[in-house]
Structure formats: structure tokens, C-alpha cells
Amino acid sequence: MWFTISEMVGIVCAVILCSISVKLVDDFLDYDLDSCTGCYNFTTILGKGTLVYGMLALALSASINASVSMPLFLSSYIVGMFKDEEQVFPSRFSGLQESLFVFILGILVWDWKSMLFSLFFVVSIQLFDDYIDIHTDQLAGYRNLAYRLGKIECLLLSILTILLSWWIEEHMFPVVFLGTAIFYSTLLYYQRRSLSC
């Protein structure tokens, strides 16, 4: 019983730390876009240290539970690259090619079930995030998935993908969802408090 509880707490902590890592990297890359729209961005506070703290959070996350955190991080990378599918990166691959390469690599290093679960879970979070941020992104001249697919379609696809992730890993899903919910609730509270100061 105690082992099960401690393992669940470990997974929740690993998910939170992985989410922090993804958020910091995302903020570092989106600094110019967020500056245009007036969105809160941790790079404003952390500067060049944003990536370093992101790496530290990922290292701690992997130290706690690599089998959960690494597929989630790789899936976040895949979704981020796939959004820029036509752009050619330093690897000389397009966003789509790089996404496929990382997905195959993730399956080889971990397993297909973990990668599919993580990918559907992250896609769902991204779709829901785009659904919420559609107007903010439009102000910055960025047409996110909610704009391209339609708001209702984007929300329905978000629900479908999160249900698929639940179906693939029904035992893991509640713990990962809890960790993600704690992270986003804390982030929202922190952002609102900072903006009100």
C-alpha cells in the first residue's frame, strides 16, 4: 500500500517537473511572440537562465521516473516541431520529418504504448490550450489549431485525444492527469497573482 502511494506521488512529481521543463523551453522559444501580445513569459524573469532551469527540471523529472517523464517530454517536442511542419531546422529535416524521427526513436528507447499514450495526452493539452488562446494568438498574427480547425472542432478533438490516451493507459492516466492539473492550476494562480501586483 505504502509503495503504491509513494510511486503515485513520484509520478505526480515527475509530471509536474516535466511540465515545468516544457513550459520554460516553450517560453524561451516564444519570448518574441509573447512580448508582442503582452502574455506572461518566464524568460522575462529568468533571462538566459530559462533553458538552464528547464534542463534542471527535466533532469530531476527523469531521475524520479524516466519511463513517464521522457515519453511526455519527447511527445511535447514532437507536437512543437509538427506545428512548424514546413520549416527546415538545423538538422536539415522539416518539422514533420523531425517529429516522425523523434517518435520512432521514442518507441525504440521506451515502447509504443508509452509513446502513443504520451502523444495523445500532449496533443489533447495543446488543442485545449489553442482553444483557450485563439484570440490572443490572433492578436500576434499567429493562426493556431483552433483557428485553422474551428473552435468547436478543436475542442472536440481535444476531448477525443484525451479519451484515447485514457484508453491506452487507463492505470497511468489518472496520475499523469493529476500532475498536469496541479501544474496548470499553480501556473494560472501564479500568473494571475503576478499580473495583479
Image (tube, rainbow, N blue to C red):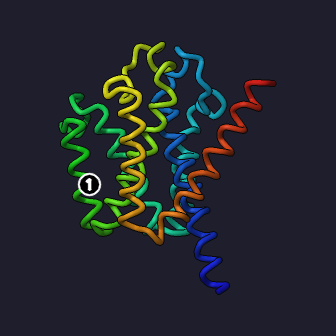
Q: Please give the name of the residue rendered at 42% of the width and 37% of the height, measured from the top-left corner.
A: 155
Figure label count: 1
Q: Which residue is mark 1?
A: 103
Nearer to me, 171 or 141: 171
In terms of depth relative to the viewer, which is nearer, 156 or 78? 156
From this view, report whether residue 25 is shown above or below residue 6.
above
Residue at 67%, 84% in the rendered image = 2
The quarter in which the C terminus is drawn is: top right
Place residue 24 in its image quadrant.
top right
Q: Position of residue 98 (x, y in %)?
A: 23, 44
* Rendered location of residue 50, percent (x, y): 57, 38
Nearest the eye: 193 or 30:
193
Residue 128: percent from the left, percent from the top? 46, 38
Q: Amino acid at mark 1?
A: Phe
Could you classify mark 1 by the number of other residues whose Cα lies within 10 Å: few (under 14), some (14-19), or many (20 or more)? Answer: many
Q: Position of residue 170 (x, y in %)?
A: 44, 68
Quadrant in the picture for the N terminus:
bottom right
Q: Is residue 6 above or below residue 119?
A: below
Residue found at x 35% / y 53%: 119
User: Left or right: 192 with respect to 8?
Assistant: right
> Does 14 sit left or right of 155 as displayed?
right
Residue visible at 54% across and 46% down? 54
Q: Seen from this angle, which residue lies furthest bottom?
A: 1
Determine whether, in the image, residue 132 is placed left or right of residue 47.
Answer: left
Quarter where residue 184 is shown:
top right
Q: Is residue 167 above or below residue 51?
A: below
Apparent side of residue 181 relative to residue 168 in the rendered image (left or right): right
Give above or below for 91 relative to 113. above
Helix, strand or loop status at disc 1: helix
Q: Quadrant of residue 46?
A: top right
